[in-house]
Amino acid sequence: MHKYLKEVAKNVRYEVLVVKREILALLKDNKEYLSQPSNEFTTQGYEIIPNFLDKDECDRLIDVTNRYLRAQSYLIGKNSYLVCRKDIRDVDLNVQQIMNAQEIDGKLSQMYEEQIIEKMFEERIGEKMRLQSITIQVDDIDTQSKRGFHSDGVTPPVYKAFIYLNDVDDYGDGPYTLIPGSHRHTIRKIINYLCVWLVNLVFKKKTFNRKKDDRRLFYHDRQSVSIFGKAGTLIISNQQLAHKGWQNHDKNKRYALICFLIAEKYYDGQPFNLGRSAI
Ligand SMILES: O=C(O)CCC(=O)C(=O)O
Ligand SMILES: [Fe+2]
């Protein structure tokens, strides 16, 4: 019994440390958001820019993508690889993503070099940004395993540019969905983290996945905005927004370029390797 209590105390100490670190990181990020210039992007956390790519280019990229899709994750080139989400996670099981897609296609490589995406963010955030990777995500129809409202981790703050490659006209096309302004909801984020921590502790992490939907409290579909747009629509987004892909994705496969960005001051020069453990 004594040994058991000691073990429990050790676990609690560890968890408290983790949560403390997370809360400090949240506060740090929040301070950064509040010091940004005030505009639509920094207050709402997202902005929509139609017609960023033309339809022919979108169709071409879908063709390129289809050539690389397989049933399992695999290495494509030196830094490019396909991640089938089912190989690493228990959510979004029908999602596949080509990472570092700028290495498999000349036009994407040009987009990577041109710094147009970086500039879009820089104009709004007011600091130098770094495009880490261009990825191509394919969301097949899924009404069972979609991840709920979450944010994409804390410190350094992550930004993404989503470019729809096919028309997303309907909920059944799986629109990117978000709660406007929620990147600045510090107290709500902290309460959500504490809730995740408590449930983890009580259920010994067996029944609750920390990474699954860490913004479940306070947010409801009623408050959310689902972003519809024709092929070529660009959405720039702060990934500390509570966000998700729509859960009743039952009509068409969705193809999207997803670009990952961080502030230049946080860039460590390491190759982008998210999900590489799947290989
Ligand atoms: O696929 C989507 O619409 C959202 C996916 C997501 O959560 C992300 O890219 O961070
Ligand atoms: Fe996300």
Image: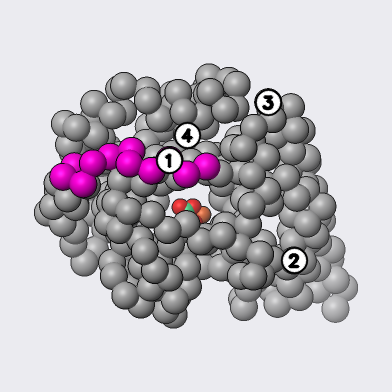
Q: Could you tell me which residue is drawn at 33 percent across and 38 percent down?
A: 52
Question: In the rendering, at what x and y percent does residue 79 appear?
Answer: 27, 37
Kind of residue at badge 1: Ile
Kind of residue at badge 2: Phe
Q: Are marks 4 and 1 in contact (CB under 8 Å)?
A: no
Nearer to the camera, 124 or 139 = 124
Is 16 situated left or right of 29 in this image?
right
Q: Quadrant of residue 229?
A: bottom left
Is 157 situated left or right of 119 in this image?
right
Image mark for residue 218 = 2
Kind of residue at badge 3: Pro
Q: Which residues are magenta?
A: 47-57
Kind of residue at badge 4: Leu
How many marks can you see? 4
- The Cα–Cα distance between marks 2 and 3, rounded to whole angstroms, is 27 Å
The secondary element bearing badge 1 is classed as strand
Q: Quadrant of the C terminus?
A: bottom left
Label 4 belongs to which residue?
261
- The Cα–Cα distance between marks 4 and 1, rounded to whole angstroms, is 17 Å
